Amino acid sequence: QVQVVESGGGLVQAGGSLRLSCVASGRFFKINAMGWYRQAPGKQRELVARITSGGTTNYVDSVKGRFTISRDNAKNTVYLQMNSLKPEDTAVYYCNANIMVSIPIQNDYWGQGTQVTVSS
């Protein structure tokens, strides 16, 4: 059984930093793309940042220059370094991993979410 678990959320003042981590565990063949999404109250879930297995990244415009996504393939882990945080970054952040559980079966797995709150 594959599990995806996030950690690292919390409360921070505007201008501060947080680092989120997400680890995938279980039996699988390969992890493809990994990403971070967020959902603020009353809003739809949006993609924040994504990284492919080869390291190609993309970001939503609102976080470019402030957030950095990275991954450690040996540890099956993806990180989101968030700097210069703003109150509008407040949301529940979810990790997503597209995992090939066997050839050719691949599924999307979601973490339980971690709350990030930025106070003004």
Image: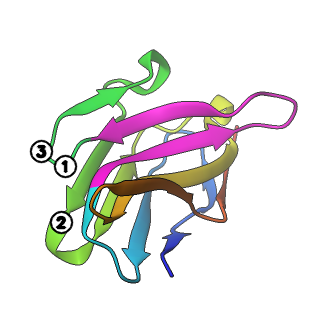
Residue 54 visible in the snapshot: yes
Q: What is the span of residues highlighted in magenta in the rendered image?
A: 32-51
Residue placed furthest toward the right: 42
Q: Residues within 10 Å of mark 2 (few under 14, many from 20)?
A: few
Question: Label 3: which residue?
Answer: 54
Viewer-side residue, 2 vs 103: 103
Residue 103: name its quadrant.
bottom left
Which amino acid lies under the numbered mark 1 shown in the image of this protein?
Ser
Q: CA distance from mark 3 to mark 1?
A: 4 Å
Q: Position of residue 105 (x, y in %)?
A: 38, 57
Q: Residue at x 60, y 30 (%)?
A: 46
Which amino acid lies under the numbered mark 2 shown in the image of this protein?
Asn
Residue at disc 1, secondary structure: loop
Question: Label 2: which residue?
Answer: 73
Q: Specify the label residue 53 is tagged with.
A: 1
Is 33 within the magenta? yes
Residue 89 in the image: above or below residue 62: below
Left or right placement of residue 72 versus residue 59 in this view: left
Sequence-earlier tag: 3 or 2:
3
Contact check, label 1 and label 2, Cβ < 8 Å: yes
Is 60 within the magenta? no
Sequence-earlier tag: 1 or 2:
1
Q: Position of residue 97 (x, y in %)?
A: 42, 55
Left or right placement of residue 47 versus residue 69 in this view: right
Q: CA distance from mark 3 to mark 2?
A: 10 Å
Q: Residue at x 48, y 76 (%)?
A: 2
